[in-house]
Image (cartoon, rainbow, N blue to C red):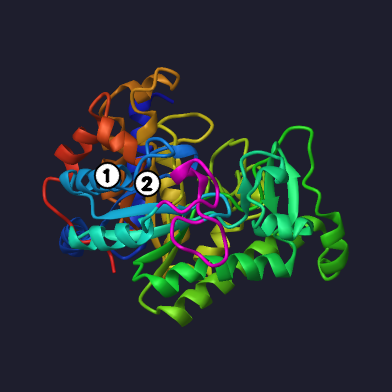
């Protein structure tokens, strides 16, 4: 099927979904106008490996603060309204935490204080600019290298080596241990207690992505805690379900106005694996490989919002954006969970990407497709450095086509 016919098919599917949701022609206009003035316009600000900020480890506190403020100002200039700031990239902290060490991405030395409070500053400065600040946590990743001896001596992973599983050249906390789940929640919720966060945000890392020829060694934990489950995969999914439900409850207990959102890999299951799955042929399925039942979290209303990472172009055979969009809309239909879409701005202009990503209009076409779908309440762009650089003008095209007027973030 050619690009135009694929796009026509997708628009027809979206039209059917809109009709099924009860949006008549008479009512669609006001609803669409309301969605245009109240919508998620977000950007991820990644700190792991100094991806977006700070540009280098070891900058002075003043230099770090200047760079951080520049990212917030860039978001404002592009009429975005939400910054999703990565504050716990690898079992560490970008605020003064009593539980975990200062992140090495600040000073170059894990545990060394940077001389200021990045999260506290980010919250205050974002709010001063009319931006929401969502604090982004990675629950289980301990280190991007596999030698525990390289962690600071006071690190919880060194004090509790039985909590840690080496896998794929990295270190992870074992999600199957109840004491691990309790600890990571306590560490993350410390930030909720201290700061008026607009939301707590998880990304796509639960159980780690598959590493060829390796297995995640949680057999002992399964023997101790998995007796009620038919297999290890079902037990692993329950471990992640518990993390999600317990984190949601903890947030509401501490700060009821703070929301909880998750941004998973964009394919729950392929249709050839499960008839409820999407018309995709992705190599990774969150349900099977990451043990994250993302569809269930939406249908059960456990989370306030979901941002599936639809990091593919329209027409891609293995994972077509135009097919995943209506699939996720159908999942969100009737749920209390708001649906936003994760957009791969970082691919725009990258010569290693397919030809579609060399076209500055590709991302704008994504927003055009989503505009006719009432379940989609906004978009989040990966990531901040790419909003600022915008090498082929893809973000500028989005702003010109879709963000000519400011919009309030959803509440």
Q: Secondary structure at mark 2?
A: strand
Q: Are marks 1 and 2 in contact (CB under 8 Å)?
A: yes
Residue 97 among magenta residues: yes
For residue 45, the mark is 2
Residue 386 seen in the current view: yes
Q: Residue 405's x, y, as percent? A: 11, 50
**Among the two numbered marks 1 and 2 on one chain, the one whose residue lies closer to the N terminus:** 2
Which residue in the structure is indicated by mark 1? 71
398 to the left or right of 247: left
Write down the region rendered in magenta.
93-114
Question: Within 10 Å of the Cα at label 2, are there few (<14), some (14-19), or many (20+) other Cα atoms?
Answer: many
Q: Position of residue 91 (x, y in %)?
A: 58, 54
Residue at x 62% of width, y 35% of height: 283
Image x and y of residue 278, in percent: 54, 46
**Vertical comparison of 184 with 395: above or below:** below
**For the residues marked 1 and 2, what is the alpha-carbon distance in whole angstroms?**
8 Å
């Amino acid at each position: 099927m050619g690009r135009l016919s694929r796009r026509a098919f997708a628009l027809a599917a979206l039209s059917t979904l809109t009709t099924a949701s009860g949006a008549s022609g008479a009512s669609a206009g006001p609803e669409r106008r309301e969605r245009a003035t109240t919508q998620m316009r977000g950007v991820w600000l990644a700190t792991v490996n100094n991806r977006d900020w700070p540009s280098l480890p070891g900058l002075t506190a003043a230099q770090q603060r200047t760079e951080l403020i520049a990212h917030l100002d860039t978001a404002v200039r592009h009429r975005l309204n939400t910054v999703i700031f990565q504050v716990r990239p690898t079992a560490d902290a970008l605020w003064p935490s009593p539980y975990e060490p200062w992140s090495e991405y600040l000073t170059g030395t894990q545990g060394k204080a940077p001389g200021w409070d990045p999260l506290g500053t980010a919250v205050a400065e974002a709010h001063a600019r009319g931006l929401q600040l969502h604090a982004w946590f990675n629950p289980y990743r301990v280190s991007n290298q596999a030698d525990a001896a390289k962690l600071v001596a006071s690190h919880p992973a060194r004090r509790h080596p039985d909590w840690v599983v080496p896998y794929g050249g990295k270190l992870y906390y074992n999600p199957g241990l109840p004491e691990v789940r309790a600890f990571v929640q306590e560490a993350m919720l410390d930030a909720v207690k201290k700061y008026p966060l607009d939301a707590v945000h998880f990304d796509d890392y639960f159980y780690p992505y598959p590493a060829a020829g390796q297995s995640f060694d949680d057999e002992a934990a399964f023997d101790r805690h998995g007796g009620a489950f038919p297999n290890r995969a079902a037990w692993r999914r329950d471990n992640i379900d518990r993390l999600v439900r317990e984190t949601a409850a903890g947030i509401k207990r501490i700060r009821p106005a703070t929301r909880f959102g998750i941004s998973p890999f964009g394919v729950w299951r392929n249709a050839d694996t499960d008839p409820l799955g999407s018309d995709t042929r992705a190599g990774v399925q969150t349900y099977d490989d990451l043990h994250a039942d993302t569809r269930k979290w939406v249908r059960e209303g456990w989370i306030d919002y979901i941002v599936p990472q639809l990091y593919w172009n329209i027409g891609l055979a293995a994972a077509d954006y135009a097919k995943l969009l209506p699939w996720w809309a159908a999942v969100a239909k009737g749920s209390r969970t708001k649906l936003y879409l994760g957009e791969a701005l970082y691919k725009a202009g990258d010569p290693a990407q397919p030809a579609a990503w060399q076209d500055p209009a590709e991302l704008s076409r994504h927003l055009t497709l989503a505009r006719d779908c009432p379940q989609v309440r906004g978009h989040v762009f990966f990531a901040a450095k790419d909003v600022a650089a915008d090498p082929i003008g893809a973000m500028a095209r989005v702003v010109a086509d879709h963000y000519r007027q400011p919009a309030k973030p959803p509440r």
